[in-house]
Image (cartoon, grey):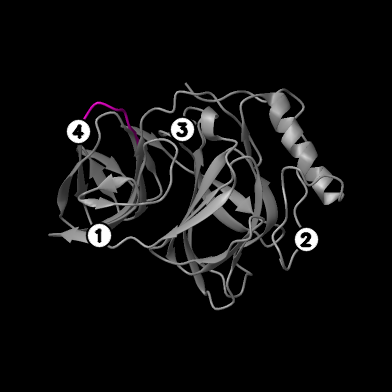
Amino acid sequence: MEVLTPRDVPLGGLRAMTVRRTLPQRQRSLVGAWCFLDHYGPDEVDGSGGMVVPPHPHTGLQTVSWLFTGEIEHRDSAGHHAFVRPGELNLMTAGRGISHSEYSTPGTTTLHGAQLWLALPDGDRQVDPSFEHFAPTPVSGEGWEARVFIGSLLGSESPVTTYTPLLGAELTLASGTTLTVPVDASYELGVLVDTGSVRVEGKPLAAHELGFVEPGSDSIELSADGDVRLLLLGGPPFGEKIVMWWNFIGREHDEVVGYRAQWEALLADDDHTRFGLPADDPLEPLHAPPLPNARMVKRGP
């Protein structure tokens, strides 16, 4: 098992909340199609302003919002207005282009969760933008409980739309529990520990770390040293190199430069061909940061 430790990243402006980012990293960009993983909280946000992310664009990906505590309000340019709540999946497909905003709600005092991205394969990355909500029914056994929000696991299956085979589930294990989880042997796996510490096939993994497991086994053994909550993520190796910069995923440097130009043109009220803006959003949209001084590097296998 390869262990990836997070780096702290400010999210937002001067009163930014800090998130722990475990993907992408220099040594690993993807786990299956999972290409981005921010993990945050528990943060007391009633006095700090919480999550404030004004309208911003995406291309070539799906966003996966999963909360443990709190509530977030979502608006997007495809006309969806929804709330992210604990144990409920919000899946936004950016496809050819979308913009959205995310704000923690006024009644939220503690915010705790994960924001993940899925890279869309080349043949599907220009699909129309869409949005799905799903509240999985927990499945449980002696000392464990699982909520499967993407793919299938432990007899539970999610109906949401994905464009490559995938797995995404929240698992909780009581102290002393050992659970052998059947998995697809073709999948790479990522184990993100939220709380507690766990042994993955006997190897220790601490809170906030991401353990990466190569394909090849049809099960994974998880042993809880104390009460544990984790996310189990997976999918077959993605097999494509991607260019990921700011909120865009493309395949070439010039393509991503073009996405940035179209977003900035929209903000100048000149070009509405790819992106729109959420209706009735309370804040002005974000401008894209300056482009890097060098050509963007493809990441992946």
The residue labelled by disc 1 is: 227
Give the CA distance from mark 2 to mark 3. Answer: 32 Å
Disc 2 crowd rating (10 Å Cα; few below 14, some 14-19, many 20+) is: few
**Disc with the residue nearer the chain's start (2 vs 4):** 4
Q: Is residue 139 visible?
A: yes
Disc 1 crowd rating (10 Å Cα; few below 14, some 14-19, many 20+) is: some
207 within the magenta span: no
Give the CA distance from mark 2 to mark 4. Answer: 48 Å
**Disc with the residue nearer the chain's start (1 vs 2):** 1
The residue labelled by disc 2 is: 284
Is residue 177 shown above or below 261? below
The residue labelled by disc 4 is: 218
**Disc with the residue nearer the chain's start (4 vs 3):** 3
User: Quadrant location of the N terminus?
Assistant: top left
Instruction: State yes or no: discs 4 and 1 in contact (Cβ < 8 Å).
Output: no
**Disc with the residue nearer the chain's start (4 vs 1):** 4
Question: Which amino acid type is shown beneath numbered disc 4?
Answer: Asp
**Disc with the residue nearer the chain's start (3 vs 1):** 3
Q: Which mark is residue 30?
A: 3
Secondary structure category for the residue under label 1? loop
Range of magenta residues? 212-218
